[in-house]
Image (cartoon, rainbow, N blue to C red):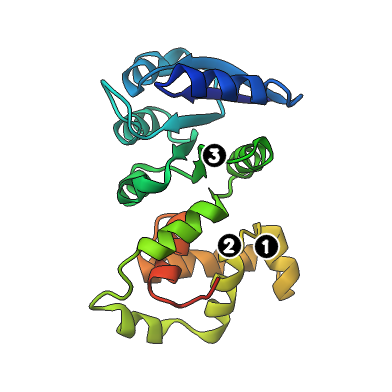
Amino acid sequence: MIRIVLVEDLDLIREGIRVLVSQIDDFEIVAEYSNGKELVDNIKHLEVDVIVTDIDMPVMDGITATRKVLAFKPDLKVIALSLYNESQYYHDLLSAGAKGFILKQSSIHELEEGIREVFNGNSYFSQELLQNVIKNMNYKNANSNTLEEQITDKEKELLQYICQGLTNQELADKLFVSVKTIESNKARLMRKTNSRNNVALILWAIKNRVVQL
């Protein structure tokens, strides 16, 4: 059973997600809150695996709440519910420790997939949302060329597949290596790009045009 906490200030959206999630046999919503402060105040009493949280909320936003709950329970997985126009918050959420972003307009199937991926230790980024981020990014930074030259062709190939949302096992199968090798190569890429997780790595790769989607 995957235990989920839902944090969303709009009653209609929160209730709609609850109804949809209740249709999935091994998903259970163990608590619901209307702002980040309620989550933070109650986190020590909760047995939860994945937190699905809105970003822009009254009293305490999703970024602050994510940072606070992960400071208390570092193993928690956090997914942000996002709107198209909230791309300015993505870097802060990544820094806070969020593992994924899902559009509020997404289908229940995508929400289910995102929760399962994050629960299993992977990152998840709604492809539609990712395309929107690409369109609104300011490509190239002052130091990008030097860093791009340090990325090998094999690392670029790995980045291409990571951006397609492949799991570590799928990456290993695709590249004919072990999962341990994939984990080692990803860790090296994250060090090179100063990326904290898969989502940050994807954003770096796209921003610097190392991959094409």
Can you say which quadrant of the picture contains the N terminus? Answer: top right
**Where is 180 relative to 80, above or below?**
below
Mark 2 element type: helix
Marks 1 & 2, CB-CB < 8 Å contact: yes
Measuring from the top left, give residue 169's x and y in whole percent.
71, 59
Q: Earlier in the sequence, mark 1 or mark 3?
A: 3
Name the foreground residue: 171 vs 62: 62
Q: Which residue is mark 1?
A: 179
Name the foreground residue: 119 vs 141: 141
Measuring from the top left, give residue 180's x and y in whole percent.
64, 63
Marks 1 & 3, CB-CB < 8 Å contact: no
User: From this viewpoint, which residue is outermost toward the left?
Assistant: 142
**Cα distance in 3D space between marks 2 and 3:** 32 Å
Q: Which residue is mark 2?
A: 183
Q: Which residue is mark 3?
A: 105
**Where is 125 relative to 166, above or below?**
above
